[in-house]
Image (cartoon, coloured by chain):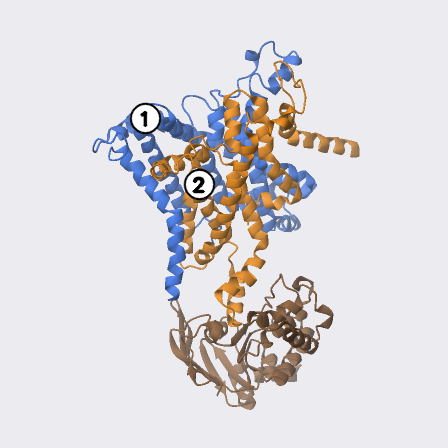
Chain colours: A orange, B blue, C brown
Amino acid sequence: MKLIRLATKILLWIIGLLPVLFLLMLSLSEVWRFPDVVAKNFNINVFIAIVDNNTNLLATIGISLFISTVVSVFSVALGFYFSKTIAYHEKKRLWSFLAYLPFVLSPVIYAACLNYFFVVAGLGGTVFGVMLAQFIIIFPFNIILFLSHWNIRMQSYAELVSTMGGSTRQTFWKVLVPVSIPVLFVALFQSFLISWFEFGLTYFIGTAQIQTLTIKVYQSIGEANIHLAAYSSLLLMIPPLILLFLNRRIVFYTH
Amino acid sequence: MKNKFKILPILIFLTITILPLVAGLIYALLNSIGLAGILADGFTLENWRIIFGTNDFFQSIAYSVTITLIVLFFAVIFALIFCEFLQTKVGISKFSLLFYIPLATPLIVAGFLTYQILGQSGLFSRIAYNLHLIKDTSQFPDMVNDAFSIGIVFTHVLISTSFFTIHFTNVFRNENISQLKVLSKTLGAGNGYYRRKIYLPIMLSKATPTIILYGIFILGSYELPMLLGRQEPQMISVAIAQKFQKYNIFDVPIAYCMAFIYTILVSTVLFILYKRKMLNNEVD
Amino acid sequence: MLLEVKNIRKKFGEEQVLKDVSFSLTYKETRSILGKSGCGKSTLLKIIAGLKLQDSGEIILNDQNINLVVPQHRDIIYIYQEPLLFPHLNVFENIAFGMRLRNKETSFIQEKVHKLIDELELQPQTKKMPAQLSGGQRQRTAFGRAIIVNPKILLLDEPFGNLDTETRASMQQLFKRICGTYHISSLFVTHDLKEALIVGDNFSLMSDGKLTNFANKQDFVNDELTGVKNELLFWKNI
């Protein structure tokens, strides 16, 4: 019985990890012709590809990291700050509804509607333009995420500190921020993931010139280079997978 | 003075959140009626006549909604089963980590994987060939870019099931359903009664807003239908994006028209949720 | 007179929560306000602390009208029923918090906080985090955090409500002792009759938004509405 349970668990893990294993196989090989199930010509060229000027992978990783980091930090910081006022406002429900709007819309359709303004402002096809466009959808996500964090307890902390003579700034930095560190980390990672995984909006506003990893995957698919596509896919999945095993709550936060 | 400090953050929030949306919507509308854009030649309803006069757009919408409903149907059922399984048989164990892996997979990668695994020259086809189940790739079932959108549904169901399983697990815990189960058993209820009268009603009522919101995400998804979808009709995001990106500039005002209608539809659904106090787990 | 509260009125929606509430508080005095849940006690305290604005009425502190003074500058500290300790700070830092807000010197803070920790019998818990403390220890820490900055008035909103009977009794005695040592003026709100009598020097009864003040303990005991007589009768008939 124990053996069967162990075998079932191993089988389920293999099925669960099949996508990752499959991507690994394609990344490390150069040939996968039909009807081969297992690819041929395994080598470590893929690791060299990262510094190969032809693939431009290093720059792609750099741009993706830069965009995702900057967008997530700004979105979380401003979302945290502004959500406090919204959470305790008498029209909280209305603001919350408005925050949902840009977030639930299809990013590619939203980007298409905004594209004219980005072009006119000279932001189309620029890194800043992509960051701004992503910020416009990730900022409201953070507003929604933090709204439930600003509960009666947090309000009581703020009131307590004010009666103790603390200024608004002291209340914010000495109490509210330290107490909110766990949720800030969750928000930071969630925001990073949204930006890291973003494709349609990035493709539109970046006019395919801003090569993030998701664009790289898409372009590799278009060029029928499945090995580069697989490798780029693995690079995309590494940050969330690592953090998943460190702390699964960071990947998915519900309240 | 205090009121001024309250208004400023709200104004900034609205500027970042709503102003771009309103600006985009207004521009889309103006472009679609010939008052903005390269082809602006004065007021015209021609693009709207094309939209409402042909079936393409509404077929796209109907197709997108159908896919969404099918995905939600299967994903919710599977998730409810997995959730109960995890709670009662396994508990929250390392095994549950498996459910997080699909969520760590971006849609573009998921689409790529589905293509390479389910495609007619993909992994499963090769296994079938080597097992002599098929003699040729064309004999393998067409599951990507096919008429039934099997690839899209399969991939979305996989990811959605993970999402909902985790969400339902949280709901299960927050609503103390395990304790309610014990209580129901002490009152003489069997497993079937517990599932019909306690588990399902509580889970579905608490999760309905999330299910609807996730449905909106699926409706507007782009990567999977782009990689795995059929040519006609296309899911709405792909249909709109392709009209923008094709070289026929006369399609652009039509695309803006479609984008405008899509945005109004989604906003209406969201507004209904708002009116019914179903956003953010609101309680009266 | 340290504090005078005159004709405070407050409405929430259609409900008149406070109806012309008036009372006074002298130096080093504890006024017990007895009242059941939902009678407006907490609202009254929050208005005095400046956390809520009254619809009408005056609050006079040291002969100055403080209606428009923000909470930070009133020097009136509000203690919640729940200790509300800062979870990221240990006992020492929680108590020292108010001193750090005022940028006091480290040596001064060390001396004052350790002295207070001794008074509150919290020496073994000095480095512990709030999650490691019992209910009574948390409330003592919250108390120490409030009095270390020598507020003009302490507002206590059922501070011992969550404690068991024994801990509650010891906290009541501790409160009395600390108030005497540090010459604290306070408003103590409670729904517990015995507690009101133990901690208070003067007494009021809050009912349905109205406050009745009593000249002395005997008047409080004799009033039918306070419930003292019923309580005595109950124990007499057992």
Q: Which residue is mark 1?
A: B251
Instruction: Name which quarter of the figure residue A251 lies in.
Output: top right
Say which chain tag 1 marks: B
Q: Amino acid at mark 1?
A: Asp
Q: x%, y% of residue B22? A: 34, 44
Q: Report whether residue A194 is seen.
A: no
Give how far apart the Cα atoms at labels 2 and 1 are. Answer: 28 Å
Q: x%, y% of residue C129? A: 67, 63
Q: Residue furthest right?
A: A2
Q: Nearer the viewer, residue B162 or A219?
A: A219
Dot 2 falls on a residue whose secondary structure is helix
Q: Which mark is nearer the camera, 2 or 1?
A: 2
Residue A137, relative to residue B228: is it above or below? below
**Residue plotted at (48% across, 65% down):** A168
Q: Which residue is mark 2?
A: A128
Q: How many marks?
A: 2
The numbered disc on residue B260 is none
**Lateral position of residue B15 relative to residue A221, left or right:** left
Q: Amino acid at mark 2?
A: Phe
Say which chain tag 2 marks: A
**Quick one: quadrant of the N terminus of chain A?**
top right
**Lateral position of residue A62 relative to residue C92, left or right:** left
Q: Answer yes or no: do the residues labelled 2 and 1 have beta carbons within 8 Å?
A: no
Q: x%, y% of residue B100? A: 61, 38
